[in-house]
Image (cartoon, grey):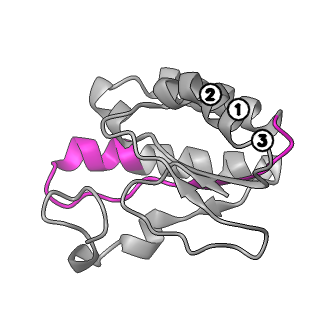
């Protein structure tokens, strides 16, 4: 299992140990570029969990972000590994525009993943109205 989810501990799976990669500030394209070298180091990995996209919101390029996600997901599917996409976390203190853009990403990404048969972690519903589960900067679970 290779996870690119920041600040998340994933216990070892029955098939072997887990590895978590953290790329603070990374955007979807950054993960797309890092993916080949990560997978080269873990040829026997069966599962890949990716959590990315929140840092792209600041650029206000929703159409480009969807295209970048489509490219990343296509690349991930081409690996033959089991893929899980971890959706964006809702924000509480970053303003209405940021929240709206994150929600827009979520409402596009969830059905997009479903249409491809890719499991999607619905963080918006898991964390919505539960600000105590997030750090004070809205970034990650404590």
- Could you give the CA–CA distance between mark 1 and mark 2, rounded to whole angstroms? 5 Å
Q: Are marks 1 and 2 in contact (CB under 8 Å)?
A: yes
The verdict on residue 120 being magenta is: no
Vertical side of 8 occupied by 111: above or below: above
Q: Which disc number belongs to residue 100?
A: none
Would you say 86 lies left or right of 13 here?
Answer: left
- Could you give the CA–CA distance between mark 2 and mark 3, rounded to whole angstroms? 10 Å
Judging from the image, what secondary structure is the residue with disc 1 in?
helix
Q: Residue furthest right?
A: 80
Mark 2: few/some/many CA within 10 Å (<14, 14-19, 20+) = few
Q: Which residues are magenta?
A: 79-102
Would you say 27 lies left or right of 97 here?
Answer: right
State which tag comes first along the sequence, 2 or 3: 2
Judging by the rendered image, the residue that carries numbered circle 3 is: 43
- Could you give the CA–CA distance between mark 1 and mark 3, rounded to whole angstroms? 6 Å
Judging by the rendered image, the residue that carries numbered circle 2 is: 37
The verdict on residue 92 being magenta is: yes
């Amino acid at each position: 299992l290779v996870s690119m989810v920041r600040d998340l501990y994933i216990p070892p799976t029955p098939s072997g140990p887990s590895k978590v990669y953290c790329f603070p500030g990374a955007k979807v394209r950054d993960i797309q570029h890092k993916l080949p070298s990560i997978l080269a180091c873990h040829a026997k990995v069966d599962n890949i969990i990716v959590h990315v996209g929140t840092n792209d919101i600041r650029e206000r390029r929703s159409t480009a972000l969807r295209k970048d996600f489509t490219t990343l997901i296509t690349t991930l599917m081409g690996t033959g590994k089991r893929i899980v996409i971890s959706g964006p976390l809702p924000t509480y203190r970053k303003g209405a525009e940021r929240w709206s853009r994150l929600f827009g990403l979520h409402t596009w990404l969830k059905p997009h993943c479903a249409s491809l048969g890719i499991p999607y972690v619905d963080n918006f519903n898991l964390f919505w109205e539960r600000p105590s589960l997030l750090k004070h900067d809205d970034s990650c679970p404590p």
